[in-house]
Image: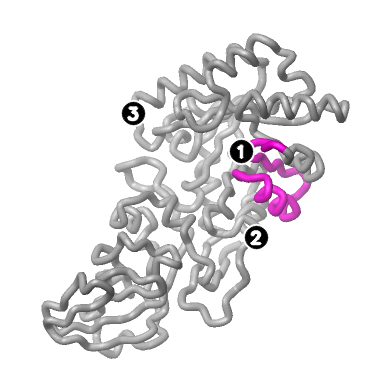
Amino acid sequence: MSARQPLHPGAILTIDLAALCDNWRMLNARLARAACAAVVKADAYGLGAARVAPALYEVGCRHFFVAHVDEAIALRPALHPDAIVYVLHGATPGAEPEFVVHDLVPVLNSLPQVVAWRDLATTLDRRLPAILQVDTGMARLGLCPQELDVVAGDRAQLHGIDLRFVMSHLASAEDKANRANHAQLERFRAALARLPATRASLANSSGIFLGADYHFDLVRPGAALYGVAPVAGAQNPMRAVIRLQGKVVQTRIVEAGTPVGYGHTWTAERRSRIATVAVGYADGYLRSLSNRGQLHFGGVPLPVVGNVSMDTVLVDVTALGESTIHEGSLLDVTAPSLGVDDIAARAGTIGYEILTGLGNRYARSYVGG
């Protein structure tokens, strides 16, 4: 599922599968009776679903969520037959037979998806498994109120469908004080009361931390598994899963008054040593980190200077001894002391975007699994 390994990479991405599995165990331990799934869409948030999902299976995870059917088809052979692979976008028109062939479970998000899945069940003369999603306030995926009225008012709409769960998705769970969380919980409970009795799923990563009322029968953590903080403004309880190190391509001394990089957006105020590092926006290091980002070496923060280029970033390494950094040295782009949430805050985005933007030019090293 991931790109081939580069022979001479400009950066090394180390993925700690032991930390990943510890994160799943920690989330699972917060649950009284609910099962803990794993969201491995977008190639496990950029970390490689073919390696991540089997590692999580080995520590007890049995429910796996992806976004697209092609992701599910690619993942299915990597997992034991008793693992269940769900497709969040559902059975899109024309793709319904692929779910049967590859033993996949669609999340039915609309009345047309329900009808198509029901019709396929009738044609095959067998019950077909599915999750039914209802929209409780995000207006993204799931039955709208009018469609819910149709399905709730006519149980024949679900004829032939083996309803595994009814689910919804929280829009603001990372903010515990947001009143939208409770409003969505109440709407979800009201929807469940109108539908055939079955198991339920509401909580994402952040929703797990809202408490037992939100857990129901299955929780669906994603970003927290990969080390992203689940609660805004609180200390992150998750272990860091990745370390990204960029190679120094060149170093140079610039005198005071020397402009550097595209557009000359930074000028040296003193005699400085500048390292050119082989990580750029083509590798997922966002251009918004120009003159704002940091790399680390031995825990020492080193400022990004000038505009981030497509393939490189310029770093002021004057704080280090001249013999410390040389061509081929590795600087930390992310590390335990420099998490994806820290980078995201500087870039004006969220940790999810940092993870899923990780480039395919990195050499990937999996440890701990």
Along the polypeptide, which appears first: circle 2 or circle 3? 2
* Quadrant in the rendering for residue 68: top right
Callout in the foreground (1, 3): 1
Q: How is the image coloured?
A: one colour
Counting from the top left corner in percent of width and height, residue 43 is at 58, 55
Front residue of 174/141: it is: 141
Residue at label 1? Answer: 89
Q: Between marks 1 and 2, how big is the CA–CA gap?
A: 19 Å
Task: From the viewer's perspective, tell me whether residue 273 is left or right of residue 154.
Answer: left
Counting from the top left corner in percent of width and height, residue 300 is at 27, 72
> What residue is at 58 percent from the left and 49 percent from the top?
40
Task: From the viewer's perspective, tell me whether residue 121 is left or right of residue 311.
Answer: right
- Disc 1 residue type? His
Question: Residue 1 shows which numbered tag?
Answer: 2
Task: From the viewer's perspective, tell me whether residue 197 is left or right of residue 139.
Answer: right
- Disc 2 residue type? Met
- Disc 3 residue type? Asn
Residue at label 3? Answer: 178
> What residue is at 32 percent from the left and 29 percent from the top?
177
* Quadrant in the rendering for residue 218: top right
Sort mark 3 into few (<14), some (14-19) or many (20+) by Cα contacts within 10 Å. few
* Quadrant in the rendering for residue 3: bottom right
Counting from the top left corner in percent of width and height, residue 274 is at 26, 81
Sort mark 1 into few (<14), some (14-19) or many (20+) by Cα contacts within 10 Å. some
Q: Magenta residues?
A: 66-93
Callout in the foreground (1, 2): 1
In the rendered image, the residue lying farthest to the top is 153
- Mark 1 touches mark 3? (CB < 8 Å): no
Counting from the top left corner in percent of width and height, residue 2 is at 61, 63
